Image (spheres, helix red, strand yellow):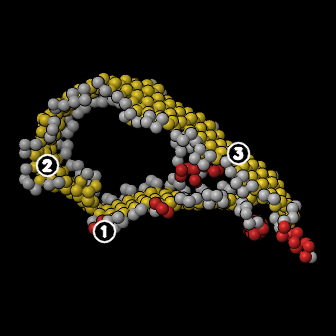
Amino acid sequence: MVQKCALLSILSTTLFFALSYIHAEDFDPDINFWPIFYYNKDTDTGEKEVEVFYPIIGWHKDKNTQVFCFRPVYSVKKIPKEKYKKSEFLWPLKYTIHAGNRTYTKSFPFYSYTKDTSGEIPEKDRTFFPIFFSRTQNGKDFAIFPFYGTFHHRFNRDKIQFILWPIYTEVIKGDRHSWNIIWPIFNYSKSTKGDEYGYKVWPFYGKHEKERSFEKGFIMWPLYTYVNAEIENVGRYKGWGTIPFYISEKSPVSDSQSILWPLFNHVNDKQRGLERWDYPFPIATRIKGKERNKNTFLPFWNIDRKRNSETVSFAYPLFWLLHYKTGNSRKTDTVRFLPFYWKRDEYLIHEGKYTRLRQIWPFYKREKEPDHSTNFEVFSLYPFLDDESWERNWKPFFHMYERRNDKASRRKTTRLLWRLYHTENSERLSYLEMAPFFSLYKNKNNNITCFSLFCNIFQYKKKETDRYIKLLYLIKIPLTLTAKNEKVTIEQ
């Protein structure tokens, strides 16, 4: 009860001073009782910002975007012109995206929901992996695994139907119809044209063939398997093996042999002009060709050179270098020592612009954008590249020091210990704050100067020739007399 009364007292006091502050002044909309309550409006751009019990509640609005946060439980971002909305609940556990006619919801790791109203008939897709699946397009898809289910156009199949999986499964792909009893043991398949059929009693014997196209099968799988196929635009492909002792595959474009796979494997890719040796896969690999050379012995080293890229790693996956080129438009150089060090340089060739990133996690992070805007952070807990969801929901809790230089708006911002020390400088304004002790604000366009102590308990303001002191938010003491005040005095 005492805690509730104390909280109610704080809220009512804050609201009283905030309302008093609003009505007492008509040209400066800022209200600063940070971290309890903070309000700011940029009179030139219309940008608004509200913080309540920072960093718990935050609201921001500009001409394109609206953002509300109740950290770390909930946040929402809206872009009305693009019909875009993204809401997050305990990110990254759950989020919902509305983009135009499409809605997508993901609850990690099991549930997902998609709704698309762009067509004549709305389509809904719902999954609770691996138990429940449904899709309402034409009312066709529904499944409660493993009891019953019907899918259309999923898993590269036209139709899949099962009853008490794996007891009964029916699959349709093109003109091929296949039935499985106690999958994968019993199978029978045929085509509607009658030129393709197959059957198997796994692992004893199986056969599948299509006239003038292919034939494949097995005897006592995996002791003997074979395939003989005519592949369009490739030619005759033949393969056989006694897995894992020996496997052979031959075609006009490539040949391969494996002995005691994965201990030894050799591939001769005639089409791409390269050879590959694995001994064993994937630990030791050697690739040699016209456009690619690779030498790998994991986890000690991996050197992979292609026509447009080069990757070098040591103690994989902890440390690696990456050089990548996209045609004649972009070059990217990356150095990573996970999770501690990350360096990335990206060069836009035609535009002559650079993007740079330096990060020593979790202590230091520095970024430079193509327009030469920069961002510098100390104590940055997120080990990957910037993620706006992380910045909305979690970053304010760990905001030790940040310095931004935005070239587009020509604004420089510095924050230390959240915003206990806060500065902003641009062509039109200058702001310095050491919360809650003092703040100094200057607006060069409107010729406004404001100095305050202890959250505006004492405040001095100047606007052009008008000057005054304000005490306790309500008591206003003019320091200059306007013409109107002089006239009133004479009449009196």
Q: CA distance from mark 1 to mark 2?
A: 42 Å
> Crowdedness of circle 1 by 10 Å Cα count: few (<14), some, many (20+)?
few
Rounded to the nearest angstrom, the CA distance separating label 2 from label 3 is 71 Å
- Residue at the spot of label 3: 416
Which of the two discs, 1 and 2, sits closer to the camera? 1
The residue that disc 1 covers is 120
**Which part of the image, by quadrant, shows the C terminus?**
bottom right
Q: How many marks?
A: 3
Amino acid type for the residue under numbered disc 3: Leu
What amino acid does circle 2 point to? Answer: Tyr
Q: Secondary structure at mark 2?
A: strand
- In the picture, residue 167 is in which quadrant? bottom left
Vertical relation: 492 (above or below) 139: below
**Mark nearer the N terminus (2 vs 3):** 2
Query: Which quadrant holds the N terminus?
Result: bottom right
Q: Residue at x 13, y 35 (%)?
A: 235
Which numbered disc covers residue 199?
2
Q: Position of residue 155 (x, y in %)?
A: 28, 52
Q: Earlier in the sequence, mark 1 or mark 2?
A: 1
Location of residue 20 (image quadrant): bottom right
Image position of 429 with respect to 366: above or below: below
Amino acid found under the numbered disc labelled 1: Glu
The relative height of residue 245 versus residue 76 in the rendered view (above or below) is above
Q: Give the quadrant of residue 238.
A: top left
| In this rendering, the label closer to the viewer, 2 or 3 | 3
- Horizontal placement of 388 versus 430: left or right? left
- The answer to whether residue 226 is seen in the rendering is no
Q: Position of residue 451 (x, y in %)?
A: 80, 54
Mark 1 or 3 closer to N-term?
1
Secondary structure under the numbered disc 1 in the rendered image: loop
